[in-house]
Image (spheres, helix red, strand yellow):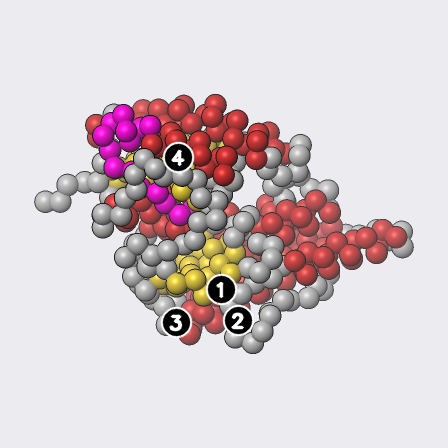
Amino acid sequence: MTKDQYILGIETSCDETAASIVKNGHEIISNVVASQIESHKRFGGVVPEIASRHHVEQITIVIEEALNKANMTPKDIDAVAVTEGPGLVGALLIGINAAKAFAFANGLPLVGVHHIAGHIYANALVQPMEFPLLALVVSGGHTELVVMKEDGQFELIGETRDDAAGEAYDKVARVLNLPYPGGPHIDRLANESDGAVPFPRAWLEEGSYDFSFSGLKSSVINYQHNAEQRGEEINPNHLAAGFQQSVVEVLTAKTLRAAREFKVKQVIAAGGVAANKGLRTSLVQTFAKENIPFFVPPISLCTDNAAMIAAAGNSMFSVGKTGDLSMNGRPGLELNSWK
């Protein structure tokens, strides 16, 4: 009988301080997240210096809580997985140094995980991943289409050329004077709307799987400013709905085309924007018609958390892909295969 494998995951790439213990890469034993949203709200976005200070205050607390909730000690852990990048360098360093200290003190292997690999592997915590699969990664800093022919193999086929989807959501939310983070508020207004302002769709060159949301964001901002100059009242619901329809249509259409071209067995969504109700509904309906299995994790596993880092770390550790105490924060880390 194979011995169970317990991975301690640590995530501090942005504004969530998180620790989790995951068994065999798919069973969450504990998952603790300390959010900083309230601290960053008044600035309308994440302030890196404040994020780092909060991580320093919280990191040992969340690691201890993850162990306590799992009713485990460091002796029960097989390896420590931590987000190595991409992310805010100051924030990454807090998690990495905590992971290095924990691993060194307890004689444990250290695994450096790519943040996006973590988001993709959040799906393994919900159901088995079947290959080949296509992952649509949509978050505040990333919009990417990734084909996985097998476990631990990544082929990036499309990415954003400017603003990520989540970034565009937050910038449009600011124009509408909505609180940070803006994505959930735009999603709510769009779902309540009885109409939509028509905005352009950025398809780029024929056959391209890349994304661009900067032009759409500018179009929304210009529409708002022109209306203000004319003294016209704008229906924020209609503006939100028009913006969201444009984003969702492009994301859905390109994901569908890629799923057909690469003949995948499964399509998954990952990242904070995968929590968006409009996008989830569109993807669920589209792939139900195509008869291709589509999965998206629950909202708690779409946003940044450490269980996803532990899940990806489990796959890496299983094939001997470990790091050492020279590990550093790598804000520009590229998504590379480990198999």
In the rendered image, which residue does mark 2 sit on? 208
Do tag 2 and tag 4 residues touch (Cβ < 8 Å)?
A: no
Q: Secondary structure at mark 1?
A: strand
Q: Position of residue 85 (x, y in %)?
A: 44, 44
Rounded to the nearest whole Å, what is the CA distance between mark 2 and mark 3? 14 Å
Numbered range of the magenta stretch: 101-115
Q: Residues within 10 Å of mark 1 (few under 14, many from 20)?
A: some
User: In the image, which is nearer the foreground, mark 2 or mark 3?
Assistant: 2
Q: Of label 3 and label 1, which has the lower sequence position?
A: 1
Identified by mark 1, the residue type is Gly
Residue bearing the label numbered 3: 262
Q: CA separation, marks 1 and 4?
A: 29 Å
Tell me the element at label 2.
loop
Callout 3 crowding tier (Cα within 10 Å): few <14, some 14–19, many ≥20? some
Q: Which residue is mark 1?
A: 158
Which residue is at the front of the view, 192 or 213?
A: 213
The three-letter amino acid code for the residue at tag 3 is Phe
User: How many residues crowd mark 4 within 10 Å: few (<14), some (14–19), many (20+)?
Assistant: many
**Along the horizontal axis of the image, is 139 left or right of 229?**
left
Work out how far the residue at label 2 is from the one at label 4, CA to CA, in angstroms: 36 Å
Q: Position of residue 95 (x, y in %)?
A: 41, 33
Between the residue at mark 4 and the residue at mark 3, the CA separation in whole angstroms equals 36 Å
**Percent coordinates x, y for residue 68 in the rendering:** 31, 24
The residue that mark 4 highlights is 96
Give whichever of discs 4 and 3 has the lower sequence position: 4
Give x and y (percent) for residue 110.
29, 38
For label 4, the SS is: helix
